[in-house]
Image (cartoon, rainbow, N blue to C red):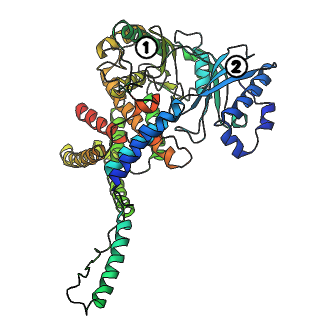
């Protein structure tokens, strides 16, 4: 493991305009990556192939085939563009978390290099191994592969067990403890409400009475955490790889933070990720999911806390859609997925409205 | 523009789908094209030619009508146009600003109530909460009814069913 210190590549990064474009120019990026890896390893590394992936709404993801790079020949390069969904980005929380979890029971890709120094590739980046496997998508629409039978059961067990292992993981003995930010059982929910409230103020393009209603409800109904854990932040169908009916890696750790583990359950329980089924993330019914999770995580799930985090997750999802609208509106990012996501603000608000009606 | 806006959008979508996307290389690029289709479908549900665009033409028609009324005085029976443009209509931007102003006032009220909820009588709060809830529900209902069917699978995969 090496954390980049950006040595000689800094001098060759070029003008600000060139840096902005570098991570979008496959040819130039491949050359820069080869030079960077050669410099980091002290031996010649060649990038044989660099392919941009269509998946993901935030970081730009490239598949890399490298020759002469000892840790792995097949790599993933993720770059957080300055105009991206959650920009400005830092690669370090994801990098530190994956590094800390390397020896845990959570299947994660090996993380090799990361830096927030934009002089290297024009934006923060993260380099890890490319794990074999496919990604079932959560949208459930035409073309989606249904998860059924033994495959579904096997993936469900892996999915729940990995989450439980994550929430059992003792992060206090790792570098994550240095960035704990004074989190406690009492303020875990407040910290997340504050975090997303700030983002709402930054992202909203127009006033949203429904968001204000939701924030008001969350502040009145926040639970006390039973435990402070590493929270993945986007734990769902679509963010893991599978091969031969087994989960080979949990992906997309960009929202990782310390918090109430029930937060991850709330997100995973969202209807958006059920793939058109009644099952949590298209994998398991709620009761069986919770029973296995509680047993594996050694944690009792307070159902009121779970409901709180479902509402919180819906609001977080609506705010993410606002981020997409803001991102597109700025004119710097023409990815058509952004305005498409923005069309989902109202449907998610309606789900919040119904959840509040049920809760009250 | 001599075609209707809905027909223009339908034509653009059909052209993208049949003539362009099959020849585009790469899942990401095709996914973006499906994103364009999705947004065009959404526009189709809520767009029309703007008031400003049509008002300008109506004002010109009114001018020529008034001019011809005088010029045709000595031609009895000539079918003189008698167009009168409606009084100035607010622009969509003006209406949007008014809506945002109203929504902001509601947001301020919701925050005000949230900070004082524990000290306010439930019977006083109930009708206020109910009125706000009804407005929000109506707003969301309209927003949703004016949105096209999502195409996230097509956008992620860069292909449609059967491809």
Left or right of residue A106: residue B63 = left
Quarter in which the N terminus of chain B is drawn: bottom left
Q: Which residue is mark 1?
A: A159
Quadrant in the picture for the C terminus of chain B: top left
Q: Are labels 2 and 1 on one chain?
A: yes
What is the chain letter for disc 1?
Answer: A
Mark 2 falls within which chain? A
- Is A323 in front, or is A210? A323
* Up-down relation of residue A211 to residue A75 (above or below): below
Instruction: Give the labeled residue for mark 2.
Output: A66
Q: Are marks 2 and 1 in contact (CB under 8 Å)?
A: no
What is the secondary structure assignment of the residue under circle 1? Answer: helix
**Residue A194 visible to the viewer:** no
Q: Is residue B91 above or below residue B42?
A: below
Q: Residue at x 44, y 19 (%)?
A: A227
Count of labels in the image: 2
Q: Give the image location of residue A224, x and y in percent.
A: 39, 25
Q: Distance of mark 2 from mark 1, alpha carbons?
A: 30 Å
> Label 1: few (<14), some or many (≥20) within 10 Å?
many
Residue A213: quarter of image: top left
A301 with respect to A168 (left or right): left
Query: Which residue is more in the foreground, B18 or A357?
Result: B18
């Amino acid at each position: 493991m090496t954390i980049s210190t950006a040595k000689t590549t800094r001098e060759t990064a070029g003008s600000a305009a060139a840096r902005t474009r570098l991570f979008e120019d496959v040819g130039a990026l491949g050359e820069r990556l080869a030079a960077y890896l050669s410099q980091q390893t002290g031996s010649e590394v060649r990038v044989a192939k660099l392919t941009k992936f269509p998946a993901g709404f935030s970081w730009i993801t490239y598949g890399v085939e490298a020759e002469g790079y000892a840790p792995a020949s097949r790599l993933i390069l993720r770059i957080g563009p300055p105009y991206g969904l959650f920009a400005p980005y830092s690669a370090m929380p994801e990098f530190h978390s994956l590094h800390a979890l390397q020896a845990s029971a959570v299947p994660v890709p090996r993380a090799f290099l990361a830096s927030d120094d934009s002089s290297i590739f024009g934006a923060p980046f993260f380099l890890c191994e490319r794990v074999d496997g496919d990604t079932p998508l959560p949208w459930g629409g035409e073309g989606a592969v249904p998860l059924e039978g033994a495959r579904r059961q096997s993936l469900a067990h892996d999915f729940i067990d990995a989450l439980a292992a994550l929430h059992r993981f003792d992060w206090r003995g790792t570098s994550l403890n240095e960035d704990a930010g004074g989190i406690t059982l009492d303020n875990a929910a407040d910290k997340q409400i504050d975090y997303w409230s700030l983002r709402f103020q930054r992202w909203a393009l127009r006033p949203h009475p429904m968001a204000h209603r939701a924030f008001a409800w969350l502040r009145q109904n926040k639970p006390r955490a039973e435990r402070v854990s590493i929270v993945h932040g986007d734990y769902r169908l679509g963010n893991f790889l599978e091969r031969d009916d087994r989960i080979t890696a949990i992906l997309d750790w960009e929202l990782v933070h310390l918090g109430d583990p029930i937060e991850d359950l709330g997100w995973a329980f969202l209807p958006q990720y059920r793939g058109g089924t009644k099952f949590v993330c298209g994998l398991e019914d709620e009761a069986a999911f919770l029973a296995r999770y509680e047993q594996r995580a050694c944690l009792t799930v307070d159902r009121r806390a779970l409901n709180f985090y479902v509402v919180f997750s819906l609001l977080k999802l609506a705010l993410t859609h606002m981020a997409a609208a803001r991102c597109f509106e700025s004119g710097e990012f023409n990815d058509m997925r952004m305005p498409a996501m923005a069309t989902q603000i109202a449907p998610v608000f309606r789900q919040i409205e119904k959840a509040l009606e049920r809760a009250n | 523009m001599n075609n209707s806006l809905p027909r223009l959008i339908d034509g653009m979508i059909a052209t993208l789908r049949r003539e362009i996307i099959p020849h585009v290389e790469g899942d990401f690029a095709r996914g973006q094209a499906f994103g364009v289709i999705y947004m065009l479908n959404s526009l189709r549900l809520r767009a029309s030619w703007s008031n400003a665009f049509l008002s300008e033409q109506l004002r010109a028609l009114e001018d020529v009508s008034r001019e011809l009324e005088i010029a045709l005085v000595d031609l009895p029976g000539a079918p003189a146009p008698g167009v009168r443009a409606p009084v100035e209509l607010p622009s969509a931007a003006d209406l949007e600003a008014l809506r945002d102003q109203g929504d902001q006032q509601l947001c301020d009220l919701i925050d005000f109530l949230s900070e004082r909820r524990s000290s306010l009588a439930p019977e006083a709060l109930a009708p206020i909460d109910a009125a706000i809830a009804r407005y929000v529900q109506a707003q969301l209902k309209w927003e949703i009814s004016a949105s096209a069917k999502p195409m996230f699978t097509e956008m992620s995969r860069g292909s449609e069913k059967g491809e």
